[in-house]
Image: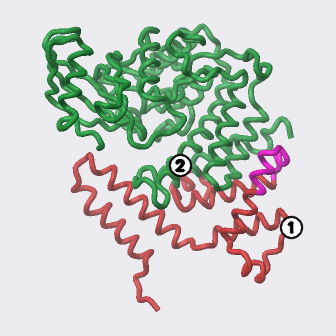
Amino acid sequence: MRDGPDGTDLLRHARALLLGALLPALPEDLRHQARLIAKALGIAAAEQTAGTGPLEAEADALAELYGEARTPAAREAEAVEETLLRLNWRLASEIRGAKRDGEAQIYAIVRAAMLARLREVNPKLLEEENLD
Amino acid sequence: MTLNLLAEARPALEDFLRASSGARAAEIVEATPLTGGAIQENWRLEIDFDGGALPGRQDLVLRSDAPTQIAASLSRPQEFAVLRAVWRAGVTVPEPLWLCGDSQILGTPFYLMRHLPGVALGHQVVADTSLGGDREALAGRLGEELAKIHRITPPEPGLEFLDQPSPDPARHAIKSYRVFLDRLGRPHPGLEWGLRWCEAHAPPAGEPGGEPRGEIVLTHQDFRSGNYLVDDHGLTAVLDWEFAAWGDPISDLGWFCAKCWRYGRPDLEAGGIAARAPFYRGYERASGRKIDPEAVAYWEIMAHLRWAVIALQQGARTLSGGEVSLELALTGRLTPPELELEILRRTAPETWRVA
């Protein structure tokens, strides 16, 4: 068992220190790089906080599309990343092969996956666009 | 930096400069690395020439390949040839001076051009309205410059190395993006959705192997805010020619106006600097073409797809064991979903005409 603060907390504190104390003291030509580091820390923290939840949701949507049941046994047999790779390859191939032209269900699935990725890397954009 | 211009390469470089300019002697007084793109290395050189074609102190830029190259980009000798062609056509570019195709001097081919004053950084150009003079005039001028580039049509002497123009530029591009996606080894259904939409709604093509139905011209392929220089008064140069290719002229207009290149000013649809109208007016005036807004809108979706593929490639370069670059890594992680948001917004089910 680990004591807190956990890795997510540490990333949050590191980001705050970088943006609050270091950034204003840096020369202009290094500020861009400091912002990049802050961005990377923010994404890593968001990814840790979200855990596998967004991946599971995406896998569930794909499994439903293809009539697969993600039973506990199925989840045991195939890691979520593997399920995502397998079903997303299938979907990508069908879209490319003109078998899913304009289908609302497909659109909803790819859009939800995009929003989940965006939520981790640029939540501000989602707020600005009233998507969250 | 891999080049150490003021150390071991200096005598050979000075000898090249002396011989190329016809001077009695050439001395590099100062060499400063310039922040360039992800692909090239640029150096600003202050050089004293004794006689020759450019006597006295000269302010030049040396452009060479960086260690990592993108397959789709032109080599330095090819880029130099494009720069010469557009310089002859009257496009506002730094005057190209001398090419060194020999890798002996710097370990890679390089060329020299004049250094021009100004700022290119997209964020700065968009945000700092004291730059570039009147913004509507700047947009109009950029439209005119683009029209000048588009006056060059195949075949053009000196540009024989450019790939033969496809009779179907849009589908040709879609095919190449799919190849790039496949090489990444991971599925991207959202981008596939956008690519399929673009395939299904592509402009009419010519016969396979035959003449294109639309016009084919020299396209810049990266004509956007961030790739031109401005000073306090206006445009000083159009830069970054490494992606130039034969193509559909409207593709450059779509790239310039695409939302992803507006640097925080989505309301200013011409590159974040002005409304579309002055940009379009400048282009139409100088080209004699009438712009079809729907065709530009199509190429804006293509622009987002292209940039998404490039961003994924840039990110892939930094995966385990690859190049160490936080900037590229973040581009690969951050940019594609942002672009996909716009791609999917413009390709919703109700927009499909073929479903």
Q: Which residue is mark 2?
A: B335
Q: Which mark is residue B85?
A: none
Q: Which mark is residue A67?
A: 1
Residue found at x 66% / y 23%: B293
- Coordinates of residue A91 in the picture (x, y in percent): 77, 55
Residue B159 relative to residue B299: left or right: left
Residue A107 vertical placement versus B276 (above, below): below
Report the span colored magenta.
Answer: A90-104
* Helix, strand or loop at mark 2: helix
- Mark 2 belongs to which amino acid? Thr
- Mark 1 belongs to which amino acid? Gly
Which sits in the foreground, A26 or B27? B27
Provide the letter of the chain coloured red: A
Q: Alpha-carbon neighbours of circle 2 within 10 Å: few (<14), some, or many (≥20)?
A: many
- Coordinates of residue A29 in the picture (x, y in percent): 26, 46
Q: Chain of mark 2?
A: B
The answer to which quarter of the image holds residue B252 is top right
Residue found at x 47% / y 15%: B145
Mark 1 and mark 2 residues within 8 Å of each other at the beta carbon: no
Q: Is residue B181 visible?
A: yes
Which sits in the foreground, B101 or B260? B101
Q: Chain of mark 1?
A: A
Residue A66 relative to residue A130: left or right: right
The answer to which quarter of the image holds residue B17 is top left
Count of labels shown?
Answer: 2
